[in-house]
Image: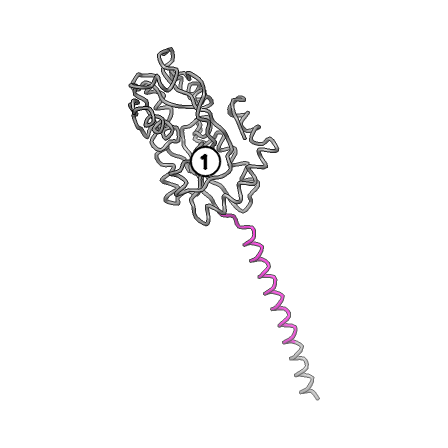
Amino acid sequence: MKKSKIWVLAGISVVLLTGVLSGCSTTKAKTVTTKTSTQTKTIYVATQNDYPPFDYVDASGKIIGYDVDVIKEINKQLPQYKFEFITGPWATVVPSLQANKTQIIADQMNTTPEREKTFVFSESYYTTPTFIIVKKGRTDITTLDDLKGKIVEVSVGDTKTTFLEQWNAANGNKLKLKYTENSQPDIYADIAAARADATLGDKVMTDAIVKKNGVNVQMIGKPFNKSDSVFVLNKDKQGKEIKAAIDPIIKKFKEDGTLNKIAQKWTSGDYDIK
């Protein structure tokens, strides 16, 4: 009789102990699941450090500008990602994406047939008209035809450069293209110092560089070659996943006025979003 009671008590103890252990195991599993669901993935965003007002480093060393604000607003809608900026000169932006050191380029880039072979592109988030940029006070250049026989300084790999190369080929190759990997402010400095006759640029950027650097250049002639700015991503699984996440947000921002509000802040109304 006593022996039976002992076995009954032992059985009850085993059941209770099992219940306690099961409870601990369940609690632990919930904790792990919760932690995993709140983890964020860091996505590095490549951008220039001297391309005002779209992306540039201010006096305190902070990256600011239109593109930067757009990326930050997008990030607020995507808690699964944490976007961090990697800044550098233009020559480093595309190679960093190709090496997967960064996963997005936010730098007023446009689509080209050559880029389409390697990259995928987001919805457009800004539209830029192009102007001829010359030294202030110069009057002999007002059209692309006037650039024939002149030195035109252009950035390697830029879509404005591609446009000018195509125009040049179709018009007798009369332009003297001077290729550089310098930043746009450096190119403008060359124009002001007569080391080159002209380049191509847009109004918002030109106004910002003149204001920030005091460089002696001006836009001239009528705008041409409007192009849509897009975020650039690698043509891989991760790139396509990020594109799928950000495209609906960009569309929403166009509709609800978010992009217009950011553009107004940085461009004083000189912008086109479509």
Quadrant of the image for the C terminus? Answer: top right
Magenta segment includes 108: no
What segment is highlighted magenta in the picture? Answer: 13-41
Q: Is residue 174 left or right of residue 32?
A: left
Three-letter amino acid code at disc 1?
Ala
Between residues 72 and 99, which one lies in front from this camera angle? 99
Dominant SS of magenta comes to: helix
Residue 110 placement (x, y as % from top left): 44, 33
Q: Is residue 32 above or below residue 172?
A: below
Q: Is residue 31 above or below residue 180?
A: below
Residue depicted at x 58% and y 55%: 34
Residue 3 placement (x, y as % from top left): 67, 87
Residue 69 placement (x, y as % from top left): 52, 32
Q: Is residue 233 left or right of residue 169?
A: right
Between residues 6 and 79, which one lies in front from this camera angle? 79
Residue depicted at x 46% and y 50%: 237
Residue 257 placement (x, y as % from top left): 60, 30
Residue assigned mark 1: 106
Q: Quadrant of residue 111?
A: top left
Q: Residues within 10 Å of mark 1 (few under 14, many from 20)?
A: many
Q: Is residue 6 above or below residue 195?
A: below
Give the total of numbered labels: 1
Q: Quadrant of residue 160?
A: top left
* Farthest residue, direction right: 1
Between residues 164 and 208, which one lies in front from this camera angle? 164
Colour scheme: one colour
Q: In what element is the residue under mark 1?
A: strand
Magenta segment includes 15: yes
Quadrant of the image for the N terminus? Answer: bottom right
